[in-house]
Image (cartoon, rainbow, N blue to C red):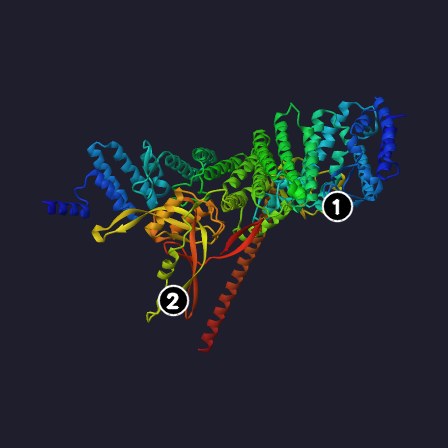
Amino acid sequence: MSFLKNLKEKAKDFTGLGLNAQEEYARAYEKGVLLQKYQDAMALFERAAAKFEQDGNKGMARRARANGALYSLVNGGGHAVVPRAISALEGLDEIEHIGSQHEVVPVAPMVAELRALNREGLAQSASDRASRIEHYREASNLLMPLGNEPLQFAEYLSLTGPVSKYSSRGLYYLGFSDYHSAFASVNASPEEAHNFLQKALGSFRAAGAEEMAKKTSGYIENVKSKRHCWMCGREMQGEGLFYEYYPTDAGSYQQSLIEQLEQDTGMLDREGHVTLCTVCGQAVENQADKYATMRAQEVREWAEAEFAHVATRINDIVEEVNNINNRIRKLQRAAHTHSG
Amino acid sequence: MTSPANSELLNALDKRLALGEIDLATYKELRAKFAAEVSEANADPVGHAVDAMPVVARSLDCPACMAALPLDESWEEKSVITCTYCGQTFALGTAEKEMERLRNDIQMWINQLAGSTATSSTVDEASRSYIFREKIFPTLRTACDRATEIYALSRHQPLFNFPLMDLLAQTPFAEALALSPDNEVLAASMRDTLARLRAPAVRAFAVRDEDARALTGLQIQCQELVHFGNARRQISNGTPDGYEKAISNLDAVVELYEDLTGDETDTTRNLFYEGMTERVKAVQEAIETLRQLTVEGAGFAAEEAAATLDRCATYCEESATKIQQSEALPNIAIPAADAARADGAAIRHCASVVTLYDRVDLGSENAGFEEFTLELIRLIQQTRPRAATATWLGAFVNTLYAHLAALNGELIVHALPHTYEWADQAAASGCQSGFLGKSETYTIGEKVLLPVWAAHIRHSQCTGRFLNKKGQSVECTLLLDASRHGGSCITVAGDAFETSCGTAKGGSSSLPPSISVVLPVVTREDAAAKVKSHIAQQEEFHGGYADLDCLIYVPAARVTYSWKKGDRSLTLLPDGSALPALHHTSTNLGATTVLVASD
């Protein structure tokens, strides 16, 4: 009897057939998670969930499904499986630590992190700045209260940027929110954009995101600078945005004149260039384009008339050549007749 | 006598005193007399306004850094003057000529802008205010903006530093120092502008309070660069004289800030400058404490100094909050608040060093803070990682403090029993045999207590084969050598040793004076990162994770194995596991000898 029971147990263990919900759940660890076969683990957790449901154990069914969703993330499912993991985890208080069968951890930080990562994914794929700003800000709000613990899902989503602390990641997202706010506002107010970029720089630096900090510093340099326009005399903020350096001939005489007149010496601070506001600069460019187009048209008309005249002459010459050829051929034929 | 004539007389008096032609007593007497007459002459608002600014009128600008130097009695006896802000020397005559040139230029400029208004004594306030807003201020603002724009990044950057910070790869202060403008370049770009901003003749046009404050705002924009740059350069000298000059520079800035605080009509600016004033004053106090420690050495109460520094750090942190809450323009307030926090952090590190100095047995009553700092610098040069940060320095100083206190029996730490009976057996089992069965011989060398970080690892292990293949959860202890930055990780083998480590983690003990104890140099943060990276690289820990527990001192013995082809050395632990041979040097810190391992 004992031998048969043993045999039956062994057969169950080998094949996985006839396992109850709890045994199926344990099998998901033994044959899946703990062997790093996450694809198998996902299927086994799903089977365990179905059996728990049949038994009326909704709590464990939900936990098994949540584990299935978590391991689909661990298995390289990427941002696409994050929403499923969030909805699977919601409503649970605790769950096994990823990679462990027995250690349980609270679910709330996991859900907050996943929500933030989901927001990050949405921000990256959003086409309009307003959505990006909103998603990054919300992602930051989700992570900031979680403190200095490391992110749990960073390695499975191949995240770039800081991942060693929730707070650093939260600051990183806040930096992006301000960074995009700067670009959203720069056309209306470079000063406001400067403020946003400065906030972003502070957040990136505090988060230890040096590359983004460097990039933001570069934009600050451009957006904060002010110059007067040589033509209209108005002060404009934002190099490349509201004023540009245009090539010109300006030497020491013009520089000393500007100094004597107590005007903005910055207008001539780049050799062979002068600052013009984009309105004046584009007016000059547009007018120059207009003249250029007009001149090109004149040249085209003149050339077309010339080409037409030349074409007539060519046709005449071709006709004459053909006539000459015909005459030569006739002469050749006549010569052959006489010689024959 | 008319007021302009009086003003000329007063100016001439200033010059004669500066040139040493009259003595101070005569100067004071004559000045009081003429000033009283000027105050009675109400018909000349411009002249009156000019004379209402005696401090400016009686100052001389340093030709090197453009700082306004208040007249000093000792100038009467000298022809060469040393600037109290930048330390440069200059001839009084040359400076006076330059001042004269600037004064004339300013007068010409005012005449050009204001025409007859500049010379008229009876022109009304409304006209002067109009000229100020329409002509003077826009010109000055543009000139200020252009002269300071490329240095704007360094404007409110960190101000506090102490010699140990120079050993670090990168600090916010070092960055700020590198960005601080050179005085010569700065003087070339803003000398005329700064002179105009300070000129009483210009101030006379800033009739309304808000105009005067706007002018002071521009003055701050320029002078912050001068004084903060000077302060950073002086404090980085690390000498008492440098500290004194740094304090003078910060004093000058505080004076300017105070002109802008107390204005209830602009709460944003008020709160910002209140915060900045608190920050600069806290840094000043911290520098003064550092100066006293350096000058007075052993005679200075270090415990009190550490408490003062801690308080200054707190003030800096509080000022950062105030600056950020001021809602001033974020492009100014955010870097200023960040820099205040960086100052707070640096001051707190300095406080930790002073606390260490207070507790270390210096071995001599005359050993001062400067000598201690030099010894500590030598120690840190041996123990720092390649890219040492301020966070590492702070953690290291705290670890060093705990290590020294444990060596003196004042503090208990986690340590295994310091017995070495196991060494012989562990060394014997590590002997390698040759082809003909001949085995290495060994000698047991120095026995030490080695600091290691203990981590609890949870991972999985495969059991069974084919259909019976299963994974199971496994837990183990991992030790990371904390005495070297390139230290190895070892998995604890042997149940007895693992149990001992577990006991050590739970219990505590003091360090025995009879045994050599190696100093830990790997901080908790670095250890956590190294352990994480180790388990990610090891196949056996795949899918596992670690919790870093605590620092434990474990007994270790150096063993040299000899064979005819040569020797090899290892450091063995009680379970027989081997680490690369430990080489160490002894460094004195006061009367205590510290053992430092080398990679």
- The residue type indicated by label 2 comes to Glu
In the image, taking residue A230 as reference, residue B12 lies left or right, namely right
Q: Is residue A222 left or right of residue B227?
A: left
Residue A315 location, x and y as percent? 53, 57
Q: How far apart are labels 2 and 1 at the CA level?
A: 70 Å
Above or below residue B563? Residue A275 is: above
Q: Chain of mark 1?
A: B
Q: Residue furthest left?
A: A1
Residue A165 can be seen in this image: yes
Q: Quadrant of the N terminus of chain B?
A: top right
Q: Which tag is nearer the camera, tag 2 or tag 1?
A: 2
**Side of B531 where B159 appears, left or right:** right
Number of the label disc, if any, that sits on residue B440 = 2
**What type is the residue that disc 1 sits on?**
Gln
The residue under the point 28% across, 36% down is A63
Is residue B296 shown left or right of residue A19?
A: right
Q: Under tag 1, what secondary structure?
A: loop
> Could you say which disc has been placed on residue B88 in the image?
1
Tell me the crowding category of disc 2: few under 14, some 14 to 19, or many 20 or more residues within 10 angstroms, Cα based. Answer: some
Looking at the rendered structure, whether the residues under marks 2 and 1 are on a common chain is answered as yes
Badge 2 element: loop
Residue A266 seen by the camera: no
